[in-house]
Amino acid sequence: MAGYPLEFVQYHPYIFSPFRHCYAILPYVEDGTITLIGATTENPSFEVIAPLLSRCRVFTLNALTDEQVGILVGRALEDSERGLAELNVEVGEDARKHLVAMANGDARIALNALELAAMTTKPDGEGKRTISLATIEDALQHRALLYDRAGEEHYNQISALHKSLRGSDPDAALYWLGRMLEAGEDPLYIVRRLIRFASEDVGMADPQALTVAVAAQQAVHFVGMPEGNLALAEAV
């Protein structure tokens, strides 16, 4: 349709695209033939081609607050057409707080877990389904970790590990280490970064740091996983 003269088009076309392979539509965006509405969960500076990005306005949609997620959960429980009101669901206060906190600002996670918990909870004699904290925990435990081997999240998390080490925060460093390993990161990549950190950031302030990091690399290489994660944790 974009090839037709504008006088033959009865309406102005809008195209919604996930920002993939947009070279073909670039000329039509540039001359105003179409209006492009794009969406991506990644950094647009990395995911969108530069010529197209320079012709667009970027709007950042931030994560929801806990209060906003709580409001959506409440609506889902009260809506009889698109929600769970017909199932007569009641969520305990502790369970609701845990659901909202673990959603981490993502309404989809909260609503999907709520629906799963409601469907797996048997009604009592009066037909009421009371969702407990344990049920919510079970519904949330299979949440997939956001991670990509070569994308932005890959570098975000190794950067978080570095910053935790620089800040002398062992708990945070162990958290990011565990999260990367749980998501399937190559342990040898992590230990290589630890060796670089020991030599570049710690340096002569503690010469033994490099020895510890190299020993962890040898242990991971020799023992393998999952036992090697103990050597990584000890080095961190």
Image (spheres, grey):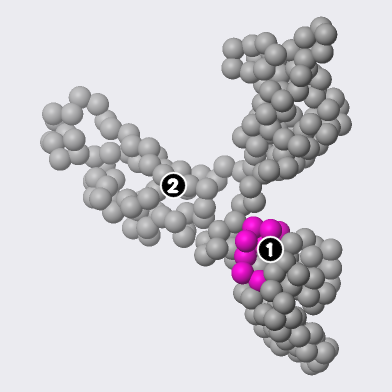
Question: Which segment did they paint magenta?
Answer: 179-187
Asked whether 98 falls inside the magenta stretch, the response is no
- 127 up-or-down from 150: above or below: above
Kindly indicate the quadrant of the structure image that contains residue 230: bottom right
Of the image marks 1 and 2, the number of the one nearer the N terminus: 2
Magenta region includes residue 181: yes
Residue placed at 45% from the left, 43% from the top? 39
Q: Looking at the image, do the residues carrying marks 1 and 2 touch, with CB atoms under 8 Å apart?
A: no
Quadrant, the N terminus: top left
Picture coordinates of residue 64, whole percent (x, y): 67, 38
Q: Secondary structure at mark 1?
A: helix
The residue under label 1 is: 181
Q: Which residue is mark 2?
A: 57
> The C terminus is located in which quarter?
bottom right
Helix, strand or loop for disc 2: loop
The residue depicted at 62 percent of the width and 65 percent of the height is 185
Q: Is residue 36 above or below residue 44?
A: above
Left or right: residue 205 versus residue 77 is right
In the image, 184 versus 63, the foreground residue is 184
Report, in whole angstroms, how far the alpha carbon at label 1 lies from the one at label 2.
37 Å
What is the three-letter code of the residue carrying label 1? Leu
